[in-house]
Amino acid sequence: ANGRPQISASFRDVAIDGAQSEDGAPEQGGSTVSITVVGASGDLAKKKIFPALFALYYEDCLPEHFTVFGYARSKMSDEELRNMISLTLTCRIDQRENCSDKMEQFLKRCFYQSGQYNSEEGFSELDRKLKEKEAGKVPNRLFYLSIPPNIFVDVVRSASRTASSQDGWTRFIVEKPFGRDSESSGELTRNLKKYLAEEQIFRIDHYLGKELVENLSVLRFSNLVFEPLWSRNYIRNVQLIFSEDFGTEGRGGYFDNYGIIRDIMQNHLLQILALFAMETPVSLDAEDIRNEKVKVLRSMRQLRLEDVVVGQYKGHSKGGKTYPAYVDDPTVPSGSITPTFAAAALFIDNARWDGVPFLMKAGKALHTRRAEIRVQFRRVPGNLYGRRRRSVGGGGTTATRELEKATNELVLRVQPDEAIYLKINSKVPGLGMRLDSSDLNLLYSERYPAEIPDAYERLLLDAIEGERRLFIRSDELDAAWAIFTPVLADLEANKVAPELYPYGSRGPVGAHYLAANHNVRWG
Ligand code: NDP
Ligand code: BG6
């Protein structure tokens, strides 16, 4: 009824059949799922996790028997937690519908336990309360670590020792950042694995839960027309673009320790790149897909300093409004050189992608909010219509000249206004021979009027169902850090000053020179 099984029937059918999960007991039947949001008082929990859980409940995607617990140090009663959550719950599925009854029912299943993050007593008390709710059923437990990374291991140690399920499965969703570089990431992995098996760790990258990113593999592998073109033979360059039209407002303290390369490129954009460039997996099983992603990541060249441009936004006034500089944020140390913008050229040294630049661009406080994958194809060899001497029709010279530049481009607009469009050259109707570049456009809002689920909904449901396909395996993480760690070290060791760009602008001009060095123009 909720339509979810159709999204990825192959693996959901397995879970629904009641098979044993890799890490525990039966998924269905006499079982219950307890979801504990650790860091429940925080920004992410309020903004994303509780609303996603409610949306899943509303769509009847949660198991019949489930309980939601919030855990944090803040003192709160169950009622206060419910009041807090209710402020951010929305009726995403259908704004016209009054879902207050469903909200009431959902909130009744939400409870709170206060405790320290490194305290076994706190998690023992949680365990006691969970048992009360789970009575008589096989208990399965999901912990969502929505907390700063320096306390991940404390929580995993305490919770795994005192609040693991005895008969069912216990899983931990871990939020990014997974370390700052290869070494710290390796240490985090080793520490988590002291208490958990790899199968219990669900490292989340919410970009993998976005609808268009899910559709990337469908587009590639279920359409005959794309896969044959998907290589250096036809693709000139690939661009992965992330831009936000707001700064680090409110998160400067976290951000300054990481910077845009770690915040966006090493995870969100690189994950998209891996899905884009991987070879065809043996099947849709999580391990087959993740094996292919690891292979392509390991074929990538380490990023070099000369292939990176960094920037930072500066204050700016426009139309009587003043926009702050990054360093104006009181939680950012004065004189910080942390990049809020970066552009990079990456290469995959394998037969399919040899020599094709994969350009990434990510920035905060730019002129627009968008996330896109842009694929620029090569020029048509011997293009009849690109020959200047054969300028024809009314628009003659201009039209042919424009066409010389207009190669095909496939764009996957991840957000906002999700769309997939292909730029093609076609004839302008009329007696003359004028050519025009236009779009074959799949605009989601027109084709699929239903609301698109938030990435966190898909990922939470996958974690509950034990589907690991969209979560990052530890060897993927190692391969991802290996690409970025040397350049991050060089940037820091050389104290490379970021190029300043005005808040709300298109970012540093250096990004254009970088692209030009690789014969690329940003789309
Ligand atoms: P918050 O800073 O809001 O922290 C969450 C909770 O953790 C707080 O409510 C607080 O609860 C507790 N906490 C905060 N700082 C400390 C500290 N120094 N020591 C111990 N406990 C602390 O984080 P977010 O909710 O913004 O993010 C949670 C996780 O998700 C982080 O790993 C973040 O990187 C990641 N993330 C966040 C995104 C976002 O949009 N917010 C986006 C993507 C990832 P209490 O005091 O009640 O114990
Ligand atoms: C997070 C980053 O992972 O993704 C944030 O830490 C960024 O800095 C956010 O704003 C963007 O996510 P979305 O889904 O809003 O594009």
Image (cartoon, helix red, strand yellow):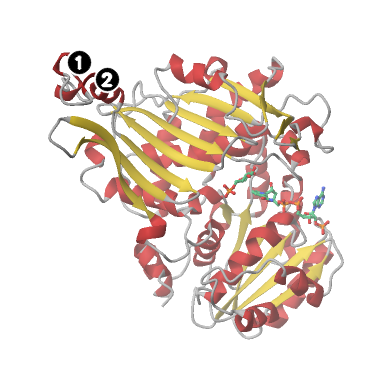
- The residue closer to the viewer here, 375 or 1, is 375
What residue is disc 2 on?
Answer: 401
Residue 357 rendering spot, x and y as whole percentages? 40, 24
Q: Quadrant of the N terminus?
A: bottom left
Q: Dot 2: within a 10 Å radius of its alpha carbon, few (fewer than 14), some, or many (20 or more) residues?
A: some
Q: Residue furthest right?
A: 75
Which residue occupies 69% across, 39% down?
247
Q: Quadrant of the C terminus?
A: top left
Against 40, is 392 above or below?
Answer: above
SS type, badge 1: helix
What residue is disc 1 on?
Answer: 388
Against 443, is 12 above or below?
Answer: below
Residue 183 rendering spot, x and y as whole percentages? 65, 32
For the image, the number of numbered tags is: 2
Q: Is mark 1 within 8 Å of ligand 2?
A: no
The answer to whether residue 346 shows anywhere in this view is: yes
Residue 506 rendering spot, x and y as whole percentages? 57, 29
